Image: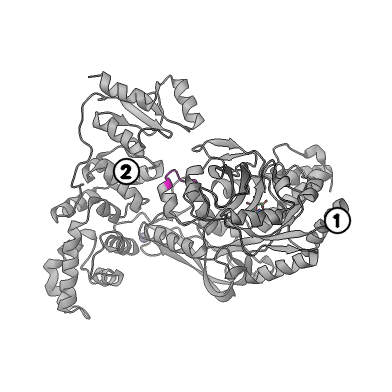
Amino acid sequence: MSPAEAAIRIEELTRELNEYNYQYYVLANPSVSDYDFDQKLKELEALEQQFPQFLDPDSPTQQVGGDITQRFKTVRHRWSMLSLGNTYSEQELRDFDERVRKAIGNDFEYVCELKFDGLSISITYENGILKQAVTRGDGTQGDEVTTNVRTIRSIPNRLKNNGYPDLFEIRGEIFMHRPAFQRLNNERIENSEMAYANPRNFAAGTIKLQDSAEVARRPLDCFLYFLYSDNRNKLFKNHWDSLQAIKKWGFHVCEHTLLCRSIDEVLAFITKWEEQRLSLSYDIDGIVIKVNDYGQQEELGFTAKSPRWAISYKYKAEQVETVFQSVSYQVGRTGAVTPVANLKPVLLAGTTVKRASLHNANEIIRLDLHEGDTVYVEKGGEIIPKVMGVNFLKRVAGAQPIIYPSTCPQCSTLLVRKEGEAVHYCPNDEGCPPQIVGRMQHFISRKAMDIEGMGHETIDTFFKQGLLRNITDIYTLKDKQDVLVRLERFGQKSIDNMLAGIEKSKEKPFEKVLFALGIRYVGETIAKKLAAHFKNIDALASASKEEIESVHEIGERIAESVNEYFAEEVHHSQIELLKRHGLQLALIVDETEHLSDNLLGKTFVISGVFEQFSREELTALIEGHGGKLLSSISGKLDYLVAGDKMGPSKLAKAEKLGIPIISEQDLLQLVANTD
Ligand code: AMP
Ligand code: ZN
């Protein structure tokens, strides 16, 4: 390759890898397999070595990737959290073994461990008490997530027995067991909350929540696999012994760890777990091999990015080839159109697969999918497998490309796509059958109005019979009994039962009704927050986007969607009808008392963590005295109430705009002083 060609290729690889990194770390939504990623990284590494003049200090080969976010305090790691070198073949592993032998001779052991597919965490203990937990971040510094980590039951807050160093750091992998993932993720899908692609993303998303109580509700687990302390070498000779001790102190150490005396034993371990990995309740993506002896580890040392005494062997994700037959375009209750590939049935990771996700129009273009293509289908921890690529060698001559439809497959309305969004929507929400039916089915579902005696099929039948057109019609069914009795398979008893269920649903609290309306992005939790804040539907309907966004943990996307919902006249008339039918469209008790008008006309932003009050209490205090909360810092803002761990960018912005930054004490003063 000429230097000019190399320069072009290096630039190309850099651009691709940076984009993958962004998708992986920032969006938690990888678009390539780990294998492809690593192949490209290796190609780039090789080129940079051959043509060092083109090595960019910001090249993806020089980074470990990052997960640092604004909302947590950033903490430096006492010992850097490096990544591991990766291998994919027996040969690469034997090369590693060769390198180790050259450096330390032939007398050593390996510890083989499963490579857990979660997120790494570093936890500090002082005198046997959990003091701090930090994510890997960029390897040098990470996010401090101590409160969240304390909720994980398999991580002791206080150690058992004794013999542990006064001060040490322990590293491990936080993960979620697959059955728990499936259960919780299904609940999210039912609630139209964002679903996670796999247990790792779910665990990673959970650790970054601001609400520790919510973290505690999600069953996370953690395997520990590294101990660091200043006097470690005095306490233990090797890694294996430290693992035995860690276990005694109360940590969860994976029972499948094995001491090996040769690379052949290591390879046998790799083969065994490649076959048996699916029988584990958690995901692994490979094996980690570590030189056991601490003295030998030191001799081997580190490269800039990883230890020379350890390496990982990565399994290829299970992938099969099959024939793609057609695309079904499913229209959901919110109008989102999802393309699903119908496949020639094929066995994959133990189950027969007939359908695979195609995500959206961009994905179909990215794959360059044509009729009759042979495709690669992969299954990670995902519920539904993904089409990863096309085997172009098997493309049928003259095959036509798959074109995403421009109109709704159910009602022929022109589809729309919002700027920045990948998903197409059918905007005909009042006339598109699957949307109408889907909304009513959502309305009556267990977590919403929970109407007894009515099921998805009842809704479907009634819709086809012309008995139901929208949710308000449910409450007029009692006047249509003469039609109902004439329906097949519908006896008087089941009619009575259903009508009683409908009557009873009128007692459901406001937050349930709000959730039942099926506003896009308003899941169960969001509905609760909105109901608590706005108290009644009219206040919510007339709220500005900014006001909605000022509610804690409600973002722009949700606020926009709520505004759009109420911008439609039909929704107002539906709500009026629901009110007339006696549904709860307001909270029954009004919790925020009106205390005074001392903060009237003043605006506030609350940020950070507070000692004396919770955020909710501060909100109640401000609103109780007539103040208003805003979602973001702007020139219009009167006060920024700042606690601990506030994002540095917010602080800087407030300072720049000259906005008074006050503490919770100052706020109390303000409330009292203006009397
Ligand atoms: P990689 O991200 O591919 O460079 O691999 C390094 C990561 O593997 C570490 O940061 C850990 O999060 C993870 N890992 C999973 N299981 C283990 C294990 N048993 N020992 C060490 N690292 C592990
Ligand atoms: Zn439609």
Residue 200 in view, yes or no: yes
Which label's residue is closer to the chain start, 2 or 1? 1
Q: Residue at x 18, y 54 (%)?
A: 583
Quarter of the render that holds ligand 2: bottom left
Q: Nearer the viewer, residue 275 or 522?
A: 275
**Predominant SS of the magenta segment:** loop
Judge from the rendering whether residue 142 lies leftward or rightward of residue 654; answer left or right: right
Q: Is mark 1 within 8 Å of ligand 1?
A: no
User: Residue 600: where, in percent of width, then height?
Assistant: 25, 25
The three-letter amino acid code for the residue at tag 1 is Arg
Q: Which residues are magenta?
A: 208-212
Q: In the rendered image, which quarter contains the C terminus?
A: top left
Q: Residue at x 82, y 44 (%)?
A: 49
Q: Residues within 10 Å of mark 1 (few under 14, many from 20)?
A: few
Mark 2 to mark 1: distance in Å? 66 Å
User: Residue 507: where, in percent of width, then height?
Assistant: 18, 57
Q: Nearer the viewer, residue 101 or 467?
A: 101
Instruction: Name above or below for residue 652 compared with residue 267.
Output: above
Instruction: Name above or below for residue 634 compared with residue 286.
Output: above
Magenta-span inclusion, residue 210 = yes
Residue under numbered circle 2: 563
> Judging from the image, what secondary structure is the residue with disc 1 in?
helix
Residue under numbered circle 1: 101
Q: Residues within 10 Å of mark 2 (few under 14, many from 20)?
A: some
- Which residue, as the protein is rendered here, is positioned at the far front? 162
User: Residue 445: where, in percent of width, then height?
Assistant: 30, 63
Of tags 2 and 1, which is closer to the observer?
Answer: 1
Q: Nearer the viewer, residue 108 or 507?
A: 108
Judge from the rendering whether residue 659 lies leftward or rightward of residue 278; answer left or right: left
